[in-house]
Image (spheres, rainbow, N blue to C red):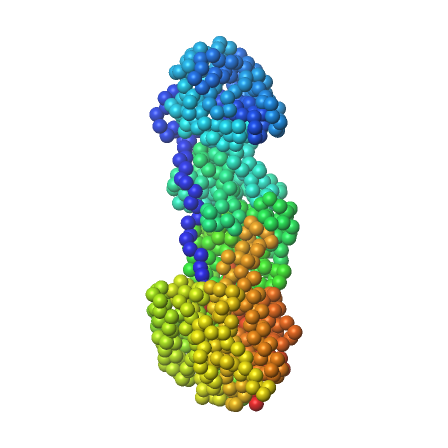
Amino acid sequence: MESERSGRTRRWAAAAVASVAVGGLLVPSQDAAYAASSDIVISQVYGGGGNSGAPYTHDFIELYNRGTSTVSVSGWTVQYASASGSAWSKTALSGSIAPGQYYLVQEAAGAGSAASLPTPDVTGTIAMSATSAKVALVTSTTALTCATGCASQAGVRDFVGYGSSASSYESAPTGTLSNTTAAVRTGGGATDTDNNSADFTVTAPVPRNSSSGGGGGGATRIRDIQGTAHISPLNGRQASGVSGVVTAKSSNGFWMQDPQPDTDPATSEGIFVYTGTAPTVAVADSVTVAGTVSEFRPGGTSGTNNLTTTEITAPTITVVASGATLPAPTLVGPGGRVPPAAVIEDDATGDVENSGVFDPASDGIDFWESMEGMRVEIDNAAVVGPRNSYGEVPVVPQDSTTRTNRGGIVLQSGDPNPERVLLDDSLAATPTVNVGDTLSGATTGVLDYSFGNFKLLVTSTPSVTSGGITPETTQTPTAGELSTATFNVENLDPSDPQSKFDGLAGQIVGSLKSPDLVALEEVQDNSGATDDGVVACEQTMSKLIGAITAAGGPSYTYRQINPQNDADGGEPGGNIRQVFMYRTDRGLAFVDHSGGTATRANAVVNTLGVPSLKYSPGRIDPANSAFSSSRKPLAGEFTWKGKTVFVIANHFNSKGGDQPLFGHFQPPTRSSETQRHNQATVVKSFVDQILAVDASASVIVLGDLNDFEFSQTADILTANNSLVDLPRTLTAAERYTYDFEGNSQVLDHILLSAGLAATAYGYDVVHVNSEFAAQLSDHDPQVVRIPLP
């Protein structure tokens, strides 16, 4: 594999300051300039109603009861004056406001058309400024007469100066509003430090009346925030009195879960609360939270393929009690919720966040989304991928189907295995495991999402029962069998530790039984990743061949062509290339036709009906745009006991840039495959030129094609049955050479011309790397033994 993602920071939103309520009392972040209202406050001001682009037809003022008792507002007024004026207009109030309840005062309408406000609790006729003015909540019907200092006037219960030109305010005015924005008090209306600038955010208006769920009353539940979709129905709005039990903590927030779930499995009962700094709550605290509902996309601007996670930001947190019982985890697998077996998403049309049906029973991406932020349990989880360098472990429930012979799970056409989830070590260590291991008992954590995958953040390290897999060994070829292998040695260069060279040598000699020919991929130049213009690789190859000899193997030699510097992709400076490494003691010989260079195109020569190569070794069509920033195919002419064999070693374009299986673009676009299709077309054309001269010619096409056995890339190469793709001849449980995020899959191929495929060949994918946490390469090699006269 050519590239790895970088960075593990889960959240890089700007830090938010949280006010923590202790014993039910808010602790302000600064000395208050005015006495904070203990109950009724102005929670929202909007003056753009009916203007151009306005979302609502009317201006409005919203009130909120942040106290613990019902308050009568009969005889009270809301009053309005221009930004610098001292003439105040009034709207009389009536009735009462219960704790945690909103109260909507509708004012004048503009000339434009837009949505109506929710049913107001009282109606006035004040035409408010859309940008900057003053609003007062007064406990009498006497009009104010002030232009400045109004917040401290007799009878003023709360005061808001909105917009930078307001002449009176609490401590500092809010930001300037517009036709499309309102001043919205944070904490769902509960935050009051008597600083208009700090207490209000300028955001989209969200008018709420006395029928709306409020903070103090606890009417906003986590499931209401999560909803039955990938994006919260309350996204961008204030939520108050959201209650739950703290289930886990990170360095910048915590997860909480409603201990009283509903019966709808589509709505999650858990959520992340983003505090920006280390949270002061403890696991098992029972809390209520007020704040802004937000959708966080992991990776920021570079993570555009990722789904979002729903969270509460700029929170006000009240610890109600400690030592609460944690909500029971949701069991996934036998005896619990069963994930879809084959479908990740089948009804979205480009973006799962705004198209398709949210159907957790049928779509894997919806299934896992429906538990976002919740405690989840998998019993006796089956390990289907080794622990990687990021501490991630892919697992599936025990009843998952289409398993490999060694315990993995097979990626197939139409089945990307939506039951997979990655265990993550963000909260607790994950164990070092191999494919086929079992995590004994219950594995429990909170469900999160990042880097294109749903993650179960384990809250304790699972126990492991070994599956006992060991590296495989293939058969020893007979004297009459030409043994040919392909092996991606993953960025091999002289600076790699000797243990890697020795380990690869051991696999070639012991597991592959010293093939006559090994087509190597990802052999780097002598200076490795140092981008210094060096392109030669004789030091790399000398070190590998020496290690093979030291391991008791035969004396190998090699042929290759140095690439142009930094022209073939891969790790910058590494100049990866394919190499023919071969032994000559059993009957194989290389036929040299000199003149091949990085830029010269090879050709098929017809000499009286006998094909040969113009250059051996030689590169196939290196100037073709199909191979731009990618490896060029290397063609070589060999003889096996006098019989000519043509071999083409390949390393096609990587899958970098493809959209992830669990990304928000559905179905995902595989943009990288277009180049592989073009590469396969060029290689197939070259093979056809050989076969056009001699239909019975012996041709082997092999290497890391970076595509599946069911892909169009493979279809192009096998068109007209002139080549047979050997991975397709294996059972599904055996045909894999790579394990990516728990999906056992085919990336490496050996293809034989029809004449060779008609022999009684023996073919084997030798599983020595991809399933193991300790691996010398991320690819498994494969070998074919061909009986030739």
Residue 554 position (above or below residue 379): below
User: Relative to the observer, which residue lies in front, 707 or 774?
Assistant: 707
Along the horizontal axis of the image, is 225 left or right of 564?
right
Point out residue 27 in the picture as x, y percentages from the top left corner. 39, 29
At 37% from the left and 76% from the top, the residue drawn is: 538
At 38% from the left and 82% from the top, the residue drawn is: 549
User: Relative to the observer, which residue lies in front, 373 or 678?
Assistant: 678
Query: Quadrant of residue 413 in the image?
Result: bottom right
Residue 434 position (above or below residue 222): below
Q: In the displayed orientation, state which residue is furthest to the top.
A: 142
Point out residue 266 in the picture as x, y percentages from the top left corner. 61, 44
Can residue 471 be seen?
no
User: Relative to the observer, which residue lies in front, 127 or 120?
Assistant: 127
At 43% from the left and 21% from the top, the residue drawn is: 166
Along the horizontal axis of the image, is 82 left or right of 359?
left
Can residue 47 be seen?
yes
At 58% from the left and 59% from the top, the residue drawn is: 417
Residue 337 position (above or below residue 79): below
Number of numbered discs on residues: 0
Residue 242 position (above or below residue 510): above
Point out residue 406 in the picture as x, y percentages from the top left corner. 54, 69
User: Relative to the observer, which residue lies in front, 444 or 154?
Assistant: 154
Point out residue 391 in the picture as x, y percentages from the top left corner. 43, 57
Q: Quadrant of the C terminus?
A: bottom right
